[in-house]
Image (cartoon, helix red, strand yellow):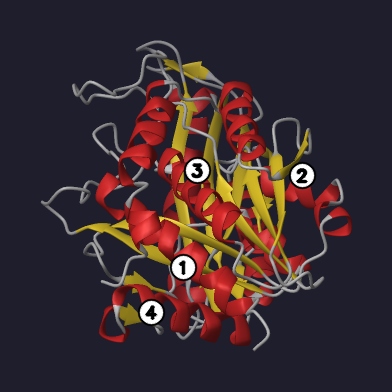
Amino acid sequence: MPIKPEIAALKDDMRTWRRDLHRHPETAFEEFRTADIVAEKLESWGIEVDRGMATTGVVGTLRGKGGGNRAIGLRADMDALDMTEKNDFDHRSTIPGKMHGCGHDGHTAMLLGAASYLSKSREFDGLVHFIFQPAEENEGGGRVMVEEGLFHKFPVEGVYGLHNTPGIPVGQVGLRSGPAMAAFDVFEITINAKGAHGAMPHTGNDAIVIASQIVTALQSIVSRRTNPLDSAVVSVTQIHAGDTWNVLPENAVIRGTARSFRPEVHDMLEREIETIGRGICTAFGATLDFRYERRYPALVNSEQESLLAAAVAAKVVGKENVNANAAPKMGSEDFAYMLQESPGCYIWLGNGSEGELGGCAIHNPYYDFNDEIAVLGASYWAELVETALPMKG
């Protein structure tokens, strides 16, 4: 793999940075220590730094030797997850209930590595904006940065992101033009029924039975209401009802998530979930309170930027190791908000095959970012800048 020697020389530094971040995870909009570290390093390399967007966001701007004004953005997420780590290695989390369980520590370290290299070489014509984003997990830090004027203050002709991906071998890259990751919604159904003694169910109308009927009926949305050629997911992830053995509760709460790619499917899922819930409640003589939140839109890569990303990845890992027509994923990413404002591309960088180093799934208490891929990610970023913003002549 043709890794730049200057980036290969940063391998130990990136591992040190990454493991320090792993020991000190910070969750949504609380990434103050992480942001301080990022800003300090960027400034030490002579990169102009802007802070405070989306509370803890950091944007570093570097001008290449060419002096032109074309610009691209490179984005890394910084936040951790609210989960308890179960690893026992030396760099495990020191913060109870918080863990870098998705590899954002590695994403930050890789973009820092690329920034370090580019600050010294500056072999490009234009500007690169290094976007270090907070709160990717659930809270939409990317949306907040966009709403606060990210691309008005730092206009770009393209924005690029990447994510480590367990299950893809080290040295391989996946991407696709068009819809690549699903929209992410959440819903909450509150059933208002009449409680009763457990020995006398006929005196009430049993919120638990109603909830059970709704959960079963929701499964028909994908199987019977969605075009088989479209992709959608409706998953019930929580049911809360009752407090004791012999009382039928008067309320039950159902929560879950819905995923889709196409706008019309997106609209249909929201409509059908509510229709089914209300219809079943009415049939049982109960009422329903319904809440539906559209969290993240579908992530859609633009064609030209996807071609560029695939070509750059091929320079780093070899054309035979780039799958430019990878299957879309039902997981979601708030980088989608940035792609709604600018053309761009989001790729998946192999973290390791299942059963090998880096193969543990993300959002798992035993997950860890594979430090062996840091030089690949940093090289991809550097090659992307030098290819998208080539020196004249």
Mark 4 vs mark 3: give the one in front.
Answer: 4
| Relative height, residue 141 to residue 314 (above, below) | above
Q: Are marks 3 and 2 in contact (CB under 8 Å)?
A: no
**Mark in the foreground, 2 or 1:** 1
Residue occupying image coordinates x 53% and y 23%:
203
Q: Name the residue under label 4.
A: 315
Alpha-carbon distance for marks 3 and 1?
A: 15 Å
First along the sequence among labels 3 and 2: 3
Q: Crowdedness of circle 1 by 10 Å Cα count: few (<14), some, many (20+)?
A: many
Determine the secondary structure under disc 2: helix
Kindly report the distance in space between the C-alpha atoms of the residues bearing marks 4 and 3.
22 Å
Residue bearing mark 1:
347
- Amino acid at the residue labelled 2: Val
Above-or-below relation of 329 to 120: below
Q: Nearer the viewer, mark 3 or mark 1?
A: 3
Q: Residue 144 carries which label?
A: 2
Relative horizontal placement of residue 318, taking residue 241 as reference (left or right): left
Find the distance from the CA under tag 3 to the CA under tag 2. 19 Å
Viewer-side residue, 127 vs 360: 127
Q: Can residue 382 be seen in this view?
A: yes
Q: Which amino acid does label 3 sit on?
A: Thr
Residue denoted by label 3: 108
Q: Position of residue 126 (x, y in %)?
A: 74, 69
Mark closest to the chain's N terminus, 3 or 1: 3
